[in-house]
Image (cartoon, rainbow, N blue to C red):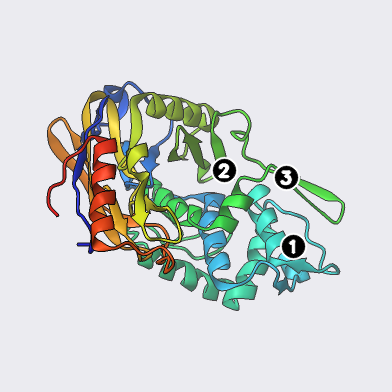
Amino acid sequence: MKKAVSLVILTSLLFSLGAPAALAEGEELGVSVSASAAIVLEPETGSVLYEKNADERMLIASTTKIMTALVVLEHCELDESVEVTWTHAATEGSSMYLDPEKSYTAEDLLYGLLLVSGNDAAAALADHVGGSMEGFAELMNEKAAQLGLENTHFVNAHGLDAEGHYSSARDLALITAAALENDDFREIFSARSYTLYGLTYVNHNKLLGSCEGCIGGKTGYTLACGRTLVSCAERGGMTLICVTLRDPDDWNDHCALYDWAYSAYELVPFLTERARRVEVMSGLSEFAELTTPAAGVLAAKTSAVQRKVYLPMFVYAPVMSGESLGRAEVWVDGELAGSEPIVCRSAVLTDETNLLSPWERIKRALEIAGNAGVYYSRF
């Protein structure tokens, strides 16, 4: 407890929302897709809004390159020079048309990898980071194990069909969720185009600009695999990831799934606007900005949700970054759906020229309480 007059405020806010129940497949949810396997994941809470054969091991074609990009970003800098050989340039399948006589950075190749699905870029990056395609695949599988993926195994960086190379809709969504935490990945993933040596690479993801809120995606296709698509969208402060495997109507299915999901669910923040900062006495800043480790709770727009915030009306400096100052809860239909500590975003140090005497502290506390219309739980 802070060395301060300690006050507990209980604020409650009711919405017409509710927590998502265990989700069924198909038309029971009022939505269906043509895909053999699919999933819609909210990455902040890990909630699955829709799934269909989500754990089935399947070929994934060039959606492999999401993991390729993640591993590259974790093992090298964007400005590193990458050697491109004629062998890399001759890699079969989709290409960014690398010229071994020109110089390229890892960033250049990542744009070619994610925007136009360059298999040549994947081969060059794999050799640069892993020493060989086999060595890079080992790094990919190590990352898959780190993420706890149970239905994924890689043997190459580009996604061309190969024995022992597979993933599932759920695992691809989890890989994408991990990749989205990387700011460089997000920037490249969402780019509409990239120009290099007079060539302009246009993102193959048709959902950018045509599907409301779409912020990125990766296509994939081989004859054996069929059409695969991973995309992500943001609407109303909530991010969703959608994956479809072997889906002849993937563009329309992703748009339909997003429209359905955003109309049915909402991410309820733990903190009310009033609780996003707390006044600091004798501090170099007047207020401390507050946050919670998790942003909120996913809730359906069909039931009552109550938010409860337990927070001191004020604290005395110093306040340390990450210091816990209270607790926030979200209740759904009378049951606790989530609870998070309320922590300080950044430190507020003491203003040594503005220290308050014990009597001034009490007086100031009474003034704050009177203005806020609240009661002290204790002194």
The residue nearer to you, when weighing 329 against 53, is 329
Contact flag, marks 3 and 2 (Cβ < 8 Å) = no
Q: Secondary structure at mark 3?
A: strand
Q: Secondary structure at mark 2?
A: strand
Q: Please tell me the numbered disc located at residue 30.
A: none
The residue nearer to you, when weighing 284 against 308, is 284
Q: Position of residue 371 (x, y in %)?
A: 29, 37
Rendered-image quadrant of the N terminus: bottom left
Q: Which residue is mark 3?
A: 193
**Which amino acid type corresponds to the residue marked 2 in the rendered image?**
Gly
Sort mark 3 into few (<14), some (14-19) or many (20+) by Cα contacts within 10 Å.
some
Q: Secondary structure at mark 1?
A: loop
Quarter of the image holding residue 111? bottom right
**Viewer-nearest of discs 1 and 3:** 3
Q: Which residue is mark 1?
A: 90
Report the residue at 73% width, 73% height from top: 81
Report the residue at 51% width, 41% height from top: 231
Q: Which residue is mark 2?
A: 216
Q: CA distance from mark 1 to mark 3?
A: 23 Å
**Which amino acid type corresponds to the residue marked 3 in the rendered image?**
Ser
Report the residue at 58% width, 71% height from top: 133
The residue nearer to you, when weighing 5 against 291, is 5
Of all residues, the one furthest to the bottom in this rendering is: 131
First reached walking from the N terminus: tag 3 or tag 2 = 3
Judged left or right of residue 282, residue 84 is right
First reached walking from the N terminus: tag 1 or tag 2 = 1
The residue nearer to you, when weighing 290 against 161, is 290
**Which amino acid type corresponds to the residue marked 1 in the rendered image?**
Ala
Report the residue at 37% width, 38% height from top: 273
